Image (cartoon, grey):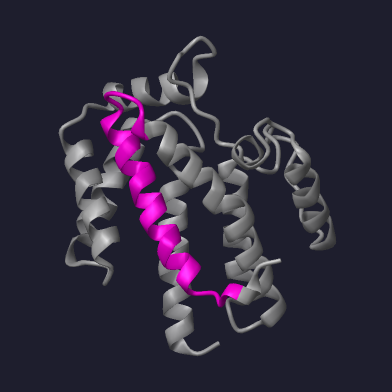
Amino acid sequence: MNNTVQDTDSARLVLYAFVRSFFDSQPSKEKHEYWLMLLDALGSGTGSRPLDEALLALKTALSSSEVIDVQNEYYELFENPFSPNRIQPFSSWYKDGKIMGPSLVKLRQLLYNLNLGKEDSFRETEDHLVFLIDVIMHLIEESGRQDCENTGVQASILRNYLLPVIRGMEEKMGSLENFTVYKAVISVASAFLGLEECLFPSGDST
């Protein structure tokens, strides 16, 4: 792997981990500090105007929010079963109109062929946003974009699962009032995945 590819993949891993951290568990003081620290580090720009604008909006939202505010957003969006604002972080919800739809079966077959699976401690299905990011990060760490088969799998996970869930969540969030931080988070994720899609020729996904 040449240095340019290695640097690109390192930057990709940082941004995937950053997005993941907003969805893997309740926000905390430590997370809030980490988010602002990383956003400060990214202040010099990523080279993408849409992503830079989304990151700046997220920094502004986080800077003006207390930890409890972000925790309340997370609870209402992802944990409170009675919340009218609850959104689903599962790709099958947006692809099939229901959780555990046929696209999940297809994803499980793909993961089986790759000899990948989730740990018992992860209770959600494999099409959950967090697990999908874990898969992409594993593929990046394994061999980067020089391996054609690996590249095709990354493109497939991105286009067929990650993008549908992020764009579905973004559409749902657009109809909600408030939730300033998580609206900004999903805008960052959408801008970042738009860049990710440009890494792969359209024929790479299956």
Relative horizontal placement of residue 23, taking residue 175 as reference (left or right): right
Is residue 76 at least partly visible in the picture? Answer: yes
- Where residue 159 appears, as percent x and y from the top left, is 58, 59
Q: Quadrant of the N terminus?
A: bottom right
Quarter of image, res 73: top left
Q: Position of residue 122 (x, y in %)?
A: 67, 36
Q: Mainly helix, strand or loop, the magenta region? A: helix
**Above or below 100: residue 69:** above
x, y (%) of residue 198? 46, 72
Residue at left 70%, top 35%?
Answer: 121
Of the 4 image quadrants, the one containing the C terminus is bottom right
Question: Which residue shows up at 48% across the image and 80% down it?
Answer: 6
Does 17 lie within the magenta span? no
Query: Is residue 37 placed above or below 156 in the rendered structure?
Result: above
- Residue name at image x 72 percent, y 77 percent: 149
Magenta run includes residue 178: yes
Q: Is residue 22 visible?
A: no
Q: Is residue 89 left or right of residue 195?
A: right
How many discs mark residues in the rendered view? 0
Q: Return the residue found at the far bottom.
A: 2
Q: Is residue 56 above or below residue 74?
A: below
Which of 184 and 171 lies nearest the eye of the viewer? 171
Q: Write down the region rendered in magenta.
A: 174-202
Identify which residue is drawn at 20% across, 55% down: 40
Location of residue 72 with respect to 174 vertically, above or below: above
